[in-house]
Image (cartoon, grey):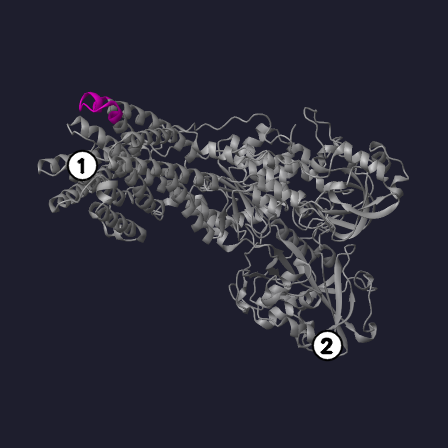
Amino acid sequence: MGKELAGEEEKPAISWHAMSVDDSLKTLGLTQDHLTNGLTTSEAAERLAQYGPNKMTEGKKTTLLEMIWKQVANVLVAILVTVAVVSAVRAATATNSEDITTNWIQVGLIVGVITVNTYIGIVQEGSAEKAAEALKNMLSSDAQVIRNGIKCMIPGMDVVPGDVVVLSLGDRVPADLRMFEVANLASQEAMLTGESVPIDKVTNAIDIAGGNPQATPLGDRRNMCFSATLVAQGSGTGIATTTGDNTEIGTINALVSKVEKKKTNVLKQIDTVSKWLAFFISITAVITFLVAKFRTGMSAIDSVSTALVCAVAMIPEGLEAIVTLTYAWAVSNMAKNNAIIRALPAVETLGSVTVICSDKTGTLTQNVMSLTAFVTSNARYRNDVNSSDRVNTNFVRDDSYMAERANHQLQRSVSQVIKDGPGTNEPRRGHANASNHFAIQSLHTPADGGAIAERVSDSLPVGEGESPSTDYIRSALAGGVLCSKCVLGAGGTREGEIGNPTELSILRASYFAGIDIDKLKKDAPVVAEVPFSSEYKFMATVHNPTEVDGPGMEGNYVVHAKGAPDRMVNYCAYQAKAGLLGEEYKEPIDRNYWIEQIAVLSSHGLRVLALCRASLPKDKITPGDQLGPEFVNENPEGPWLTLVGLCAIMDPPRAECVQAIREAHGAGVRVAMITGDHKDTAVAIGHMLGIVDETYNDALTGPQLDEMSDDDLRQAVLVNNVFARASPQNKIRIVKALQAEGQIAGMTGDGVNDAPALRAADMGVAMGKEGTDVAREAAEMILADDNFATIVTAVREGRVVWDNLRKILLVNTPINNAQGLGVLFGLICGLAEAPLSPIQVLYSNLICAITLGFVCAIEPAEEGIMTMPPRRIGKRLIGRYLFLRIAIGTLALVGCVVGSVFWAQALGYTQKQMRAQAFNTLDFGAIAVTLSARFAYNSSFDSRIFRGNPYCWYSVAVVSVLQVALTYIPGLNTAVFSMSGMAGPQWGIVALFAVVMFCVMEGEKAVRRKLKMQGKDTDDNEPFIFDADGAAEEQDGPLVPKGTSHLNLAELTK
């Protein structure tokens, strides 16, 4: 339990929830009197030694030395270290003071580069232990137990299996408990089960369906309380059954501690590119050594030094820093848009996501129950739930709005429609009653089979497309406002609101229609009431009449009643014509019409509430009466109420999510919705959002997923976008099935039980407002606003990162290659010394990466980036055409550098001036490459080159000023950089070759644009040597991580 012995086989899980209290005691080796006396001090000590302390085992942490070794254990660093060692030897053996200084500066620079890159790598490493630490912080610090027959407080770590634990309101449960005594006890278990409301507790054994007790979801184990959950109401006493790692939350801790570090596509490809670079650099260095030794006649040590200078020149020392900077810039941009990235390489993953699996409530929807439609005897009114204006025009008559049943419910009976929708009376997991207080218990078309009266279109009180008056809305919705004890939040928001969300939706709609809620309640206080009960599912209040109720009410009270529509229809004898009040508008009720309207609205996933009213002589009621339900449902004269209308209520989609999903679809990204809500509600929201369409036109439920084999599930996730009544464990299977089909999957989650699914997904996304710390620590990205649209914004930024990384390679690689190959080809062409000194090489490497690379790192998105499909798995950074561009840039820049040196030599300049010539031609040529590389396809011979990225020209200015300064500052130019000041004509050579470089790169783009128009693969979609393996990885075993089935949230394997 708390202790796990090395090599010990995993024991079968004990189904405590399926046992009686007596059987649980026997299994723990306890007697019946233990329930009152608890453990003795000695028994507790023995059990503590046997099971270990009640805490979670910490995973192995990476030491600082291990992290350092991970960063430096590669070929490129080894080459740098070799150069540093040779430079140190040369410094130690040199007799010339200038050579000594130069070599020691070179050693210092190389050590500095290695140190900085190592530090950056360690800092950006995600701390996988944080999620497990967050779980440990959730454990109870103290517990009230019965020991030696006395209640006492002990540290939570000292709780052992067999302890009798006493729970009170607000307590955090210290261990998994089998409850044997409860008093209105309910615990908040959302982090484990996904249920948003507290789960009521019982003491009897749970009936097992199907014969497998381990298949019982946690939410249905209502005789158990689980470690780290909170007591939301009542009190109780239970026996500790498991502690530490063997609790349900301990199992999750084991899963999140076993983090499998996955390298993103970019990191894999950079590793591949590094290997090819190391091979190419080694070959170039050997050739340089041979040329220096046997062609120019240098000494062995000088030849080695020259070869190593060539190697250093070609090593992209600043590449890792600029890649990190690219990620960091994208992270900063996303944070401004409420997307917080926890691991920098995750930014790149966003750009290749092919499917986003999102929660519904609060992410795709507003998490605010809202009145979306009001149905009267002759009309339907649509309410604009997104309006922030308090005007009557929020309501518009629209008789076509949800006027027919949803397609998938067209051929079903009324009772079947209700069962699938939010009005069902079936309780959710772990609850004695339905989550909808006004659930429909029984609704059938009347036995007489009478036809629905034909609806006659009229313009009472307004015509199609018009808005009713504020007075009409006030009178129609008065029953929902007055027959309620709810308190609306400040300014119609949720802040400070009190009451049932379904009832509050009517108050909110009235408020935003311009009705003064407080005045309405003040003018018509409650005289008597029938309080709500889940047994009869309605409430009623009695009021003095006001002007709202119309004339002719003298001597009468007004009765308002609201409740489950199936009940209220049966209590009504009349209906209010067009929702108007007054005796002249009262007509016999058409029950078939109302029953069908209830079914129609339910088929679209709407909760339905009926508003009724009546009048009653004042001598029938005494003010202050607490009336019983018989006041409404057992009237001596039979049905007597008047049905005013039906309120259709739902948690509506976020307005911005509709556009975000449209944008995602345009970018080739599929959006799936996973929710614990009812199927009809999920499908209705899916239709509104554009998730459900002709291609993906149905939904699967959690129980259906549980019954599927892994192969069946892999097919199901490709043809369904909506998964309803789903458990957190269904999430894991869904994401694994998608990955098995070659998809790059993003997954949202907010509870502790979502942590394994977030880890399993390619991109785990946690909620920032409603989520738990554990979910946030297990995810790569956190939504500060819990809004799906933020994910799509992040996907766009991820694509920008990919494009910019390719631009960085286009800039950095030719510069690095030109530095090394410039040395080699300079010697081959007859130069007596290397055209670039080691310090010049290191400086150019770093300054060009940091400044010019930075320009590409922060380049804004090019037009049309979200109209391209997601990158396929394994798509390379360096494809054929980028490789060709790099090769052209390298050859052109090498030619310019070497050519400028020979030109300077021909003009009679000194060796140090020739080095200055090569140095400046190289770096100003790099500026030309950068200006061209800012646009992948579009021409840079355009005014756009001056727009969009102001840092471009800041970087150009910095590099230019530094080049001039280093060229002319006395001492710095000669002693450190081994060059001297240039003459005027030499700057003309620099400018000419910079223009040549710019024209060469632009010419290549022009040719590529023409090839693209001819249908050539200029986007590098075809395989190349730098590609990662694009095949979907074969799943080893079932589609769930090992140990997940122990969470017991659903049946996971067959």
Q: Is residue 441 magenta?
A: no
**Image: magenta residue range:** 290-303
Q: Earlier in the sequence, mark 2 or mark 1?
A: 2
Tell me whether circle 2 and circle 1 mark residues in contact (CB < 8 Å).
Answer: no
Which of these two is toward me, 994 or 650? 994
Work out which quarter of the rendered image holds the N terminus and state it.
top right
Splitting the image into 4 quarters, where does residue 27 fall? Answer: top right
Q: What amino acid is labelled 2 in the image?
A: Met
**SS under mark 1:** helix
The label number, if any, that marks residue 896 in the structure image: 1
Depicted 281 relative to depicted 1007: above or below? above
Q: Is residue 646 visible?
A: yes
> At which x and y percent is residue 67?
49, 35
Q: Residue at x 22, y 23 (%)?
A: 299
Check disc 2: other Cα within 10 Å, few if <14, some if 14-19, many if 20+. some
In the displayed structure image, the side of residue 773 where residue 212 appears, left or right: right
Q: Amino acid at mark 1?
A: Cys
Tag on residue 979? none
Can you say whether 105 is above or below 567 in the image? above
Query: Considering the image in quadrants, where does the C terminus appear?
Result: top right
| Disc 2, SS | loop
Quick one: 757 or 66, which is closer to the camera? 66
Q: Which residue corresponds to mark 2?
A: 553
